[in-house]
Image (cartoon, rainbow, N blue to C red):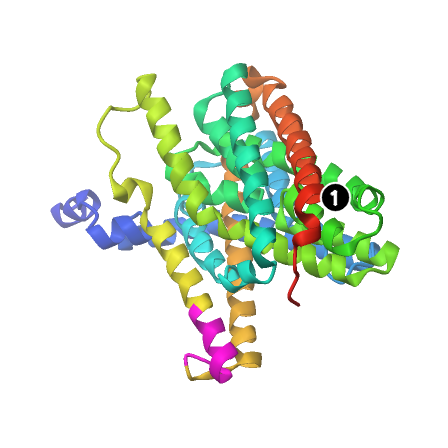
Amino acid sequence: MSNKDTVRSERQMSAWERNLIGTRVEEIPLLLPGLLLAAVLAWLSIELCEYVGVTLMGFEKTPLSSVTVVILFGLVLGNLLPLPVWLRPGVTFAVKKVLRLGIILLGIRLSVFDVFRLGAMGVPIVLLCICSALLFTTLLNRWLRLPERLGTLIAIGTSICGVSAIVAGAPAIDAKDEEVSYAVAVITIFGILATLFYPYAAYEMFGGDPVKAGLFLGTSVHDTAQVAGAALVFSGVYALPRGLDVATITKMVRNVFMVLVIPLMTVYYRRRAMAKGEIRGERTNVFKLLPLFVVGFLALAVTRSIGDAGVRAEGNAFGLWDSVTWNGIQGAIKHWATNLLVVALAGVGLSTRLRMLKGLGVKPFVVGLGAALVVGLVSFVTISLLGRFVTYWP
């Protein structure tokens, strides 16, 4: 090897290389094989969910989560076959960098105007459900002595929006791939059960009131795709389309609070971890609390809200795009956010070793079950007391 090659191989990454791509420019070709594998698994999972949910089950939108399916694909492949060394750089890039870009693009789904569509009493119902989920899940995690990061991820996923909240919160607390996979599995299992049973329970509990039923589905079912699926079942079986509208808006309002819950739970995790000596006792700084991908997420949410305000006031977003074009732009960004997250979580599945999870046993699933039951109970009680005051603005 020449001196020139030696210098090149030992060159330190520049700041932009480290933050943007995580490797030196000349090593980018090494990322392609692993990244291609993750992309293929992502494509297969998306196509499978569309086929099963739309073609076989007859839904307009599939209620199945491609994120869950791709993690399962990755887990099976990564644990049955050892991951070759030459695939690892691309898989790591998917987990570290593609994930963050997907989270940033998720911000386009959030608009502050969703909050106003439920009226003055809809938001307190959502807040009570979020707070009860966070409090109960955190206490149960501590009682069962779950690892702090895993418990924090389950609490975030239960209280806000399932898988999306977990993948958004994981980088902020430096969660391991195994912990992300386990948290996603816990949330998914109980979310699926709720999707199957809650549409019928909501009709019986609230006497067929579509607004109350929609509130219940939007606050008690974990993941956004699962809420949509449950609400589609409710509106289809009982011919009450307003239930779907209210459930969807309720879930969007719930998702808005991700921007508060993730930093707060990051503070909680760091304080607990410092008390146990798991991380150094330095002060938590704002850059640790709000890393760049969270700032990007917030910036895109603000952009969405400003654009929506322009459409409402003048008919054009930013004075450039009418409502149809603006909705198309949002749709394209949402589409790519989903695709990037599925690619990233294919990498999470491929990187996860199930033997690392054996020592945890059933405790995380006990936490997931308890959290799901408590959220459902709090949702039922608060809606029974306050639901009649909710004014839904279509």
Residue 221, visible in the rendered structure: no
197 is higher (above) or lower (below) than 46: above
The quarter of the image holding the C terminus is bottom right
- Give the extent of the magenta segment: 306-318
Q: Report the residue marked by disc 1.
A: 195
Q: Main secondary structure of the magenta part?
A: helix
Q: Position of residue 102 (x, y in %)?
A: 47, 54
Going 68% across and 30% down the picture, which residue do you hit?
373
Going 86% across and 60% down the picture, which residue do you hit?
239
Magenta-colored stretch includes residue 307: yes
Q: Position of residue 147 (x, y in %)?
A: 47, 21
Going 45% across and 42% down the picture, which residue do you hit?
261
Q: Position of residue 337 (x, y in %)?
A: 51, 58
Q: Position of residue 323 (x, y in %)?
A: 55, 79
Of 385 and 261, nearer the camera is 385
The quarter of the image holding the N terminus is top left
Q: Amino acid at mark 1?
A: Thr
365 is higher (above) or lower (below) than 299: above
